[in-house]
Amino acid sequence: MRQMFLTLLLLVAAAPAVAQDAHERDRAAVLAAAQRLFDALAARDPAAVMAVVVQEGTISGHVTRDGTTRFFADRWQDWANGLREGSERLEERMHNPRVRIRGNMASIWTEYSFYRDGRFSHCGIDLFDMAKVEGRWRVLNITFTVETQGCRRR
Amino acid sequence: MANRKRRPSVRRAMIALSAVALAGCGGASEPEPAAAAAGPSAEEKAAVLQPVNAFLDGAARRDPAALRATIHPGGVAAGVGCGPTGQYNQLFAQPLATYVETVGSMPADQRERVFDPEVRIERNLATVWNRYEYSSGGRVRAAGYSSYQLVRVEGRWKIFNYSWSTRPQDCTPQ
């Protein structure tokens, strides 16, 4: 009886550790997919963008400049093609990402800062809708705010 | 006597550990930073949930016009899990504006129940995330989680993107 209890205790005690490991792996994979999108942005590489997104998804943002906010939305392919047009070096940095995973759906809510040619440009919040398709995490949608006031440069 | 005393404590320990195990299995969310934990006010949350509830009501009534009024065009509706041919680990996606026009063809007795909606708001951007159960013909046809991305345009919250997950047993060819 006592042995059974001990076995049960061990099993039950081990379960959170196993779940935690699986969650950590998924969390790392979700964040790696988001980072691949930032890398594709930095490389201005439309093909690399399309490889990490769900093509039917959207990129949208609320851009606040001079006190007015404008909402824009684009299909991934159109946005990716637009990357070819500029030559500035773009860098987006994630800060304190919060990841929520439920099965094959996940979301990331993160602060970010944005640099052009190494110079600080703006900050804001990124929200990613992530989908696991054929075993691989991809960015379904991203929506963000663009702030030029009250940013921390980091 | 000593034996009797120990048993309840072992049971209590097991219950406590089970609770930890359950929390470990279900707890894929991370703790919020202090500022975010305070969260939006009840009024702000209600304003964000209003179009989501109107969307669900409109779907229950199979009324495309009611759904149309809750969305901001340009976004996507995506089901993660079942693909269009019924396999799992796939994705079904179409413009949200197209999706809302299809509710008229849904079963008359369909019903979607949502549980524990979580609302996050950042300026003109908000999300609602909830567990759902979709049933018709007296049984659950799909279950999982829904995510709504909302935008505030001219002072009103509208649904921009809508995605949901399904289970392997929910897949049927369309």
Image (cartoon, coloured by chain):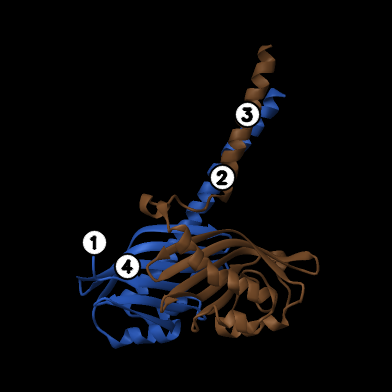
- Describe the element under mark 1 as helix, strand or loop: loop
- Residue A124 is labelled as 4
How much space separates mark 1 and mark 2, taking CA atoms?
35 Å
Q: Chain of mark 1?
A: A
- Crowdedness of circle 1 by 10 Å Cα count: few (<14), some, many (20+)? few
The chain displayed blue equals A
Query: Observer-nearest residue: A59 or B149?
Result: B149
Q: Chain of mark 3?
A: B
Instruction: Give the colour chain B carries in the figure.
Output: brown
Residue pictured at 44% horizontal, 49% vertical: B31
How much space separates mark 4 and mark 1, taking CA atoms?
10 Å
The residue under label 1 is A152
User: Total label count?
Assistant: 4
The answer to which image quadrant residue B168 occupies is: bottom right
How much space separates mark 3 and mark 4, taking CA atoms?
47 Å
Q: Is residue A137 visible?
A: no
Residue B55 rendering spot, x and y as whole percentages? 59, 74
Q: Is residue B7 visible?
A: yes
Query: Observer-nearest residue: B73 or B6?
Result: B73
| Cβ atoms under marks 3 and 4 closer than 8 Å | no
Under mark 1, the amino acid is Arg
